[in-house]
Image (cartoon, grey):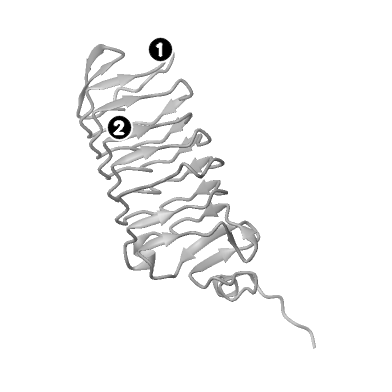
Amino acid sequence: VVNEPVSLDIASLVNSEANTDERFIFDTETGTILLYKGTDLNVVIPEELGGVKVRAIGDSAFNSHETTFKITGVTLPSGLEVIGDRAFSRNALTVLDLSVCKGLVSIGDHAFIANKLTDLVLPRSVKELGQGAFSNNQLINVNLGLVEDIGESAFVWNQLTEVVLPRSVKVVGSNAFGDNLITRVSKAKELKLGKDVFNHQEVQVNNRYKSR
């Protein structure tokens, strides 16, 4: 009897012997959580699933459109390296502790759009923020760590009053900080900013007044 090859689909991942936690659809080859199937509103993501380190949160894994409900809290594993596009979008997160994720490099497009976050401190390991990554939250304070690339509309529609761009920043996308309450911005002199980075605000950049 010749057995036909079995493709690696979601069903096989759910039933994989390596993943004993049925709350998660988990790709053991890449260490990526593909979908959250649990019902906890305050989710603790384990360091490992079936003995495999959790390295990434996949696209839309905790997106409320996929889970059909909104989580209110999440504890992330320390070995996390990548948070995918829309990974936690449209939930009800008020607190996000990234301090344990010392190897986190990238946060994808719209990863945390439409939550209720008020404060954000990026680990110094994070280099890239995708488009709209933290847009439409309630952010008052942001520490950008050593980020290099800030995507378009990354922080649009928040409540920031001041922004400090670290010297590590190389690129700031259009409308990245639009529609906030920003009046003061500090940045390295060599960093060039587009005219629409701070849309619909009147800001002082390095104590020089500019109307936006």
Q: Residue furthest bottom?
A: 1
Asked where in the image residue 187 lies, by quadrant, the reply is: top left
Helix, strand or loop at mark 1: loop
Q: In this picture, is 154 found above or below 163?
A: below
Q: In this picture, is 161 found above or below 42?
A: above
Q: Amino acid at mark 1?
A: Lys
Q: Position of residue 37 (x, y in %)?
A: 44, 70
Give neighbour class at mark 2: few <14, some 14-19, many 20+ (Cα, 10 Å).
many
Label disc, if present, on residue 177 of the rendered structure: 2
Q: Position of residue 11 (x, y in %)?
A: 56, 75
Residue tagged 1: 189
How many numbered discs, if any?
2
Mark with earlier residue (1, 2): 2
Label disc, if present, on residue 105 of the rendered structure: none
Q: Position of residue 114 (x, y in %)?
A: 29, 50
Q: Residue at x 56, y 64 (%)?
A: 26
Asked where in the image residue 119 lies, by quadrant, the reply is: top left
Q: Is residue 127 left or right of residue 158?
A: right
Task: Point out the image quarter for the C terminus.
Answer: top left
Q: Residue at x 54, y 70 (%)?
A: 21
